[in-house]
Image: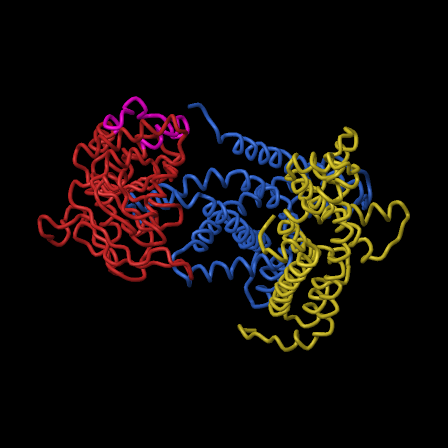
């Protein structure tokens, strides 16, 4: 017990930071894939599919991520499923991210002007052709800045995986603190690491947003 | 064990759940009121013209928006105690949540204030209004009306995020859930029930803010159109 | 698959487009109140009237962008008011050009033009590109093949949109106020393209505010007023209207 902060502690934190990045990547890929389906479901021609997707979004956006984490780790364990912290954290993040990205992307799909749909219809394109060839390519451009912005939320929210014992950045800080008991210093270091992960993403998101706004008029 | 769900032992503790939900709402309301106040001043500071103030407000917003709430809560909790100040978990939670939502509100309100057309401000100047009067009548209220939906979403997110304060033992809804599941061994049922209570709380908050919006913005109430 | 299948045989001199007693409301607002007119093969029909008179709605009904509440619409032998209509087959026969061009901003002009022939009619890529070059030459934009829409002026964009519709080799073309969004000095180039199409014998229905253009190009003028066909006839009715409403309309310019 006790002792001073040394290089081994910092290496341990670095290891935790790598897992924060890893879990963020899992959340982005898993939540992004599922969220894409949610977005398509939200604009589906079928009422039942729209309703189902909307209910999913409402339920997940009305529940704290922390409770989703507890539910998939302790809840499923109590039902007899043994789930590793990584699986619980990855699944929770995927479920959570899908609801938010799905909603962001639905907004982008709907932001493509109605006339573009009409022009594509006027050319006799089928619904899936309209979606794939005309609407989605435009929606993806609109979606890039807010998606990068949401990646900041993903990175920050992985800190909640610490509560189910997943050793990412915050959890590794807690573990070090248990032996050193220098909470203010340790959490300050952790805050700085999170900041250095998130701030570049925030900046990038804003830059993309600005350039998207400026791109409108052009040469004649 | 088998897959037999038993919600009754959880629902029997409705009194504790209700207390937890009440505390969650209290935390959220305190943080929203204080955070919105910070937001107004923060937004004015960010566009006010004084470079030092602009930088300070900008640093506050960026520092908060780019670090996790959980870490912020630990920093406030251990920061205050390392200064020798002892507060209840509820107070620490309220302070941390206020600091957090204040930053987000600053950013949203700044966008709202920036959306006010220059001609509006010039018109007010032409009528001889003071700077404070212009802010109050022409910038703050119309600006807030424009971003009111974004503010509502942010405040609901804050209410949900307040669950994180269970980690410093604030006795809000999630902490109550943790306690119930450790007593009943019914984790799954407990967290399902609590998740649904949170969903209900978010609906209640949205409805509350909708009503508040009707009270605050008479133009919207009468015309029903966005500004 | 049925792209090349001809619609149910129609008598050889049957109209290409026919509206019979068409009714349409938006909520409680009656926009079409028993509209009838027909367009023969190779004819140019111009719809005129004040804004809100129903002329754009009538045009959009022809291509099933709006569904109607009563009456009949027949286009190229198809009943457009039939709920079971194959809408995509209809739209292969009908080209439509909008006021706001609606080129796809993420595609080059060539890609805009080849998209539908390739995706809908399964025309091979190389053939579609040759087709694009041909229709672009027709509207005088052959050098803009690889430009993006935003690099073109409004008039050029509208000509490219016309070329995009032409590439589907429609049997009838609809033009919905195609010059209204253009600066006055750019309308001429677009109108010239439409005149050339008319001279080639394309069947067309146009909604326009350009009265002198209408007078020059129309085989038939349909003046709409309060959701009804108030007066219709050859282009000459614009010079000698028989109803006071049309007289007032042409008198004020619009």
Hue used for the chain lettered A = blue
- Who's the residue at 20% across and 50% down the image? C38
- In the rendered image, residue B97, in percent from the top left (x then y), is placed at 75, 51
Does C147 sit left or right of C78 as displayed? right
Say whether residue C198 is visible: yes
Hue used for the chain lettered C = red
- In the rendered image, residue C201, in percent from the top left (x then y), is placed at 16, 36
- Who's the residue at 47% across and 58% down the image? A53
- In the rendered image, residue B151, in percent from the top left (x then y), is placed at 66, 50
| Type of secondary structure dominating the magenta stretch | helix
Say whether residue A175 is visible: no
- The residue segment tinted magenta is C136-160
For this orientation, the residue located farthest to the left is C12
Using the image as rendered, state which of residue B184 and residue C8 is in the foreground: C8
Which quarter of the rendered picture does the C terminus of chain C lie within?
top left
Identify the image quadrant of residue C48: top left
Q: Which chain is yellow?
A: B
For this orientation, the residue located farthest to the top is C143
Does B89 sit left or right of C205 as displayed? right
Using the image as rendered, state which of residue C218 and residue C24 is in the foreground: C218
Q: Magenta includes A144?
A: no
Identify the image quadrant of residue A172: top right
């Amino acid at each position: 017990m006790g002792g001073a902060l040394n290089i081994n502690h910092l290496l341990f934190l670095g290891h935790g930071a790598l897992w924060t990045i890893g879990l963020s990547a899992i959340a982005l890929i898993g939540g992004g894939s599922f969220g894409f389906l949610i977005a398509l479901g939200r604009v589906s021609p079928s009422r039942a599919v729209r309703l189902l997707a909307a209910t999913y979004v409402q339920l997940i956006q009305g529940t704290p991520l922390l409770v989703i984490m507890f539910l998939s780790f302790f809840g499923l364990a109590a039902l007899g499923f043994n789930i590793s912290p990584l699986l619980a954290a990855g699944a929770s993040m995927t479920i959570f991210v899908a609801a938010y990205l799905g909603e962001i992307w639905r907004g982008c799909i709907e932001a493509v002007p109605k006339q573009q749909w009409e022009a594509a219809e006027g050319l006799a394109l089928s619904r899936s052709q309209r979606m794939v060839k005309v609407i989605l390519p435009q929606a993806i451009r609109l979606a890039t800045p807010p998606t990068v912005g949401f990646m900041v939320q993903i990175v920050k929210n992985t800190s909640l995986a610490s509560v189910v014992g997943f050793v990412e950045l915050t959890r590794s800080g807690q573990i070090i603190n248990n032996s050193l008991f220098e909470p203010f210093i340790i959490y300050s270091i952790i805050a700085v690491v999170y900041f250095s992960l998130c701030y570049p993403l925030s900046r990038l998101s804003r830059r993309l947003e600005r350039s998207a706004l400026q791109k409108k008029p052009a040469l004649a | 064990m088998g897959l037999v769900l038993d919600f009754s032992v959880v629902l029997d503790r409705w009194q504790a759940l209700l207390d937890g939900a009440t505390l969650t709402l209290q935390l959220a309301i305190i943080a929203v009121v204080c955070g919105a106040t910070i937001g107004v001043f923060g937004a004015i500071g960010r566009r006010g013209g004084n470079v030092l103030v602009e930088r300070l407000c900008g640093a506050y917003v960026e520092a908060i928006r780019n670090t996790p709430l959980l870490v912020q809560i630990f920093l406030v909790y251990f920061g205050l105690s390392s200064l020798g100040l002892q507060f209840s978990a509820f107070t620490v939670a309220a302070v941390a949540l206020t600091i957090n939502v204040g930053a987000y509100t600053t950013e949203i309100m700044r966008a709202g204030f920036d959306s006010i057309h220059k001609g509006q401000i010039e018109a007010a100047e032409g009528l001889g209004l003071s700077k404070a009067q212009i802010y109050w009548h022409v910038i703050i209220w119309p600006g807030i009306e424009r971003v009111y939906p974004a503010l509502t979403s942010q405040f609901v997110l804050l209410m949900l995020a307040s669950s994180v304060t269970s980690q410093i033992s604030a006795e809000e809804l999630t902490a109550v859930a943790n306690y119930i599941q450790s007593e009943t061994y019914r984790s799954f049922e407990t967290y399902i029930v609590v998740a649904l209570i949170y969903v209900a709380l978010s609906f209640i908050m949205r409805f509350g803010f909708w009503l508040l919006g009707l009270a605050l913005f008479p133009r919207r109430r009468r015309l029903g159109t966005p500004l | 698959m049925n792209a090349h299948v001809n619609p149910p045989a129609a008598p050889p001199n049957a109209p290409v487009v026919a509206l019979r007693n068409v009714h349409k409301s938006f909520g409680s607002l009656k926009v079409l109140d028993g509209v009838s007119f027909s367009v023969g093969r190779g004819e140019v029909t111009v719809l005129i009237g004040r804004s809100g008179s129903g002329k754009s709605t009538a045009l959009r009904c022809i291509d099933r962008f709006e569904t109607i509440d009563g009456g009949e619409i027949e286009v190229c032998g198809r009943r457009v008011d039939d709920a079971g209509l194959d809408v995509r087959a209809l739209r292969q026969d009908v080209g439509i050009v909008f006021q706001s061009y609606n080129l796809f901003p993420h595609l080059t002009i060539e890609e805009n033009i080849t998209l539908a022939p390739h995706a809908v009619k399964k025309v091979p890529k190389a053939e579609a590109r040759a087709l694009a070059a041909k229709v672009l030459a027709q509207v005088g934009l052959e050098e803009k093949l690889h430009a993006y829409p935003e690099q073109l002026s409004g008039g050029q964009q509208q000509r490219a949109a016309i070329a995009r519709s032409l590439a589907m080799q429609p049997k009838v073309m609809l033009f919905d106020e195609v010059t209204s969004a253009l600066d006055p000095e750019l309308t001429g180039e677009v109108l010239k393209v439409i005149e050339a199409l008319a001279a080639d014998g394309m069947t067309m229905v146009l909604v326009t505010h350009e009265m002198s253009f209408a007078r020059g190009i129309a085989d038939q003028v349909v003046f709409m007023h309060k959701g009804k066909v108030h007066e219709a006839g050859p282009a000459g009715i614009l010079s000698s209207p028989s109803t006071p409403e049309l007289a007032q309309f042409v008198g004020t310019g619009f």
